Image (cartoon, rainbow, N blue to C red):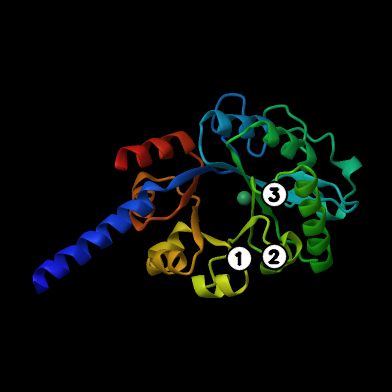
Amino acid sequence: MKRLGKFFATLICCLACLAAQAQTQVVAHRGYWKTEGSAQNSLTALRKAAEARVYGSEFDVLMTADGVAVVNHDDNIGPLDIVRTPFRDIKDHRLPNGETLPTLQAYLEEGKKLEGLQLILEIKPTRDKAHEDRTVDTIVKMVKDLGLETRTEYISFSLNVCEQLVRATGGASDIYYLNGDLTPREAKEKGFTGIDYEHTVFRKHPEWVREAHDCGLKVNTWTVNRKKDLKRMYELGVDFITTDHPEEAARLVREAR
Ligand code: MG
């Protein structure tokens, strides 16, 4: 009888693990940019992610000195520090695929047309807390005005940005912390809805995936490009894998099910 109990406990544990894995979905890192005619954080990369039918498309956002949110990974465009530069001085910047630097407004309007694609919006940290706070308020209002609150999921390395997002969104959108230095319970206590840590963090703390799920948090991991890392993260039962190879990752996840 005791053995039978142990068998069922193991079976339930395996089924729970499989159920978690079955939900693992893919996010395109900076859009799907490793394709013909695409570029990181371009509108094309956003459209290509939708065509690849992945869960979401991630992109990076900073706000200029005069309050225009733009989609760009690096803090600088050439010698210009984006947060200290007026929009007029960078608006004509060209991406490697020939597109001009997208504003967040244009990016979200394009994303709105791509039904079924989640918009994974990273707010980049800055050294200026007041600028971070203004950035959060500007972006949250824009997302709300476009009716994209449930389709937008916020991520940030900045603890302050995530805390400001909790205040500004009032629970209308998901918020994931990126920096890898909070336990799931600590992230939960701050009001975040998920953790989105580098895959090396989950290799060091594999128990955090279960702990996060146990306290109702979702788990994303970045930037998972190697097959063996994809397999390991999938086996841990993360909810989302962010990768530069969305089509290959989606295929691997499908085959592993
Ligand atoms: Mg990013």
Foreground pick, 43 / 97? 43
Mark 3 vs mark 2, CA separation in Å: 13 Å
Residue 124 x %, y %: 70, 56
Label 3 sits on residue: 149
Label 1 sits on residue: 192
Q: Find numbered disc 1 in the image and state the secondary structure of the residue it sits on.
A: loop
Question: Label 3 is placed on what type of residue?
Answer: Glu
Q: As drawn, which residue projects farthest toward the top?
A: 36
Quadrant (top left, top right, bottom left, bottom right) of the C terminus: top left
Q: Find numbered disc 3 in the image and state the secondary structure of the residue it sits on.
A: loop
Residue 238 x %, y %: 42, 55
Question: Label 1 is placed on what type of residue?
Answer: Phe
Q: Classify mark 1: residues with Cα within 10 Å, few (<14), some (14-19) or many (20+).
A: many
Residue 10 x %, y %: 20, 64
Mark 3 vs mark 1, CA separation in Å: 15 Å
In the image, is the residue at mark 2 within 8 Å of ligand 1 by its beta carbon? no
Q: Return the disc, 3 or 2, that comes first in the chain's sequence.
A: 3
Foreground: disc 3 or disc 1? 3
Q: Return the disc, 3 or 1, that comes first in the chain's sequence.
A: 3
The residue located at (80%, 57%) in the rendering is: 135
- Residue 47 is marked as none
Instruction: Mark yes or no: residue 60 visible.
Output: yes
Q: Classify mark 2: residues with Cα within 10 Å, few (<14), some (14-19) or many (20+).
A: some
**191 on left or right of 138:** left
**193 on left or right of 140:** left
The residue located at (57%, 24%) in the rendering is: 36
Q: Are marks 1 and 2 in contact (CB under 8 Å)?
A: yes
Quadrant (top left, top right, bottom left, bottom right) of the N terminus: bottom left
Label 2 sits on residue: 166
Q: Find numbered disc 2 in the image and state the secondary structure of the residue it sits on.
A: helix
